[in-house]
Image (cartoon, rainbow, N blue to C red):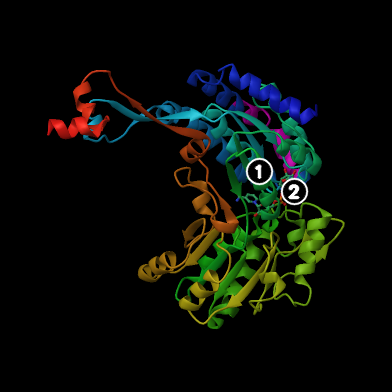
Amino acid sequence: MSREQMVVDGARKSFQTGKTKPLDYRTHQLKSLLRFITERRKDIADAVKRDLGKSEHGTELFETLGLEGEIKLAIEKLAEWAAPRPVEKNLLTILDDVYIQPEPLGVVLIIGAWNYPWAVTLQPLVGAIAAGNAAVIKPSEVSSHSAKVMEEFLPQYLDKDLYPVVTGGVSETQELLKQRFDHIFYTGNSTVGKLVMEAAARHLAPVTLELGGKSPCYIDKNCDIRIACRRITWGKFINCGQTCIAPDYILCEPCIQGRVVECIRQTLLEFYGADPKSSPDYGRIINQRHFNRIMSLMEGYTPVVGGQSDAPQRYIAPTVLKDVPPHSRLMQEEIFGPLLPIVTVSDMDDAIHFINEREKPLALYIFCTDKKATKRMIEETTSGGVTVNDVMMHYTLSSLPFGGVGQSGMGCYHGKHTFNQLSHQRACLVRSLGMESVNLARYPPQDRRRARR
Ligand code: NAD
């Protein structure tokens, strides 16, 4: 029996004891998870610094703050989320109890990615605990320092049998995927997403796939370009462009392209100074493989901003490329790095056409002050989520379902959405044995009914 199989069996046995059913138990685990984040803040920040060169403030802002908010919300709302929900009745059930009862699914597998190693791994866990599941947690091996801290300290806070951490690489993940789960929650690229779905199909396990893709950003020529570029520059270059919902590329009319470039240049100077390499707020590429991949995407272009790199440090400067041909390689795959291509379009209709010709994105950003035009662009496109006149901010709301559509993913999470995603919505009808005469109409034989008529 493999180590992975033993861990999953252990989690299932523990789940089957019914330990996770009482809400008090779930609340206790959620509080312990909150305590883990508070008490291990320094270990978490150090690990992320070593993995991604991120500042302590950056980790606070983009990893732990949202996570803490999600845990607190789950603690506050758990009783409400887990309560039976009465639903409408029909004439035949008017005297009965009819309700939806959320129930735990069983054992959930959470496979995390490296770019926000804490947020993408532990936020699904919040919902898994709240919904009363056991969860096997598999952090990404790529963000190895974070994975090590998670493996070492999380079991000191959470029930070890119900919420075990399994570290390792592809072979360990594949071994895990051979096991039977009641739900698999995967964050990462779509190639592996397909393998996860294949493995899940063998056990008919439902999946949530939080994938990536190219998230477009349209700038209308009449909007405040300076402010638009400030917000885009923040979203694109934070975490060195390694953010699933970072604006992947800009679409704008040729007449504003020069001004867009200038505004981004000025903003970069303001954010990271003349030498972003020495800025404590500018990160690094996760590893050499990704460094080489991103560098190769730049081949054949002369950047209008940035373009410098330092391989040993895995540093790539914030880079802007203009007049990028729509069918170039840069425009085929998710960039997931600090390169920002600008593609020109003739107008908003052309931008809509451009977006709709491609895979459904994880996020869409529209900078436009004309409300009617904005509404039309939302109506005539699709994406996992959309933010107007800013980037990425829809992610911060626990009330909005976060997830992709089509190639950018399936299922969603955050706040109550995670709870629902990892619960079975059981349909319950409870009636009495009285009023039997009402039922005669549905019983055979038909002849008896005809005779009565
Ligand atoms: P990654 O390399 O960390 O892989 C993710 C997980 O998949 C890891 O735990 C790894 O062990 C496992 N894995 C890798 N190869 C495997 C294989 N062959 N078989 C089984 N398991 C395997 O992360 P990544 O895929 O490089 O992550 C980046 C991608 O994730 C980007 O596309 C990004 O947009 C996307 N992403 C999406 C979200 C979201 O919320 N939608 C969040 C973060 C990242």
- 261, 75: nearer the viewer: 75
The magenta stretch is 35-49
The quarter of the picture where the N terminus appears is top right
Q: Which mark is residue 50?
A: none
- Do the CB atoms of the residues marked 1 and 2 lie less than 8 Å apart? no
Cα separation, mark 1 vs mark 2, equals 10 Å
Q: Residue 382 appears at what percent x and percent y?
A: 48, 62
Q: Is residue 249 left or right of residue 104?
A: right
Magenta stretch: dominant SS? helix
Q: Is residue 237 left or right of residue 87?
A: right
10 Å crowding of disc 1: few (<14), some (14-19), many (20+): many
Judging by the rendered image, the residue that carries numbered circle 2 is: 52
Q: Residue furthest right?
A: 312
Question: In which quarter of the view is residue 240 placed?
Answer: bottom right
Q: Residue at x 79, y 73 (%)?
A: 299
Judging by the rendered image, the residue that carries numbered circle 1 is: 59
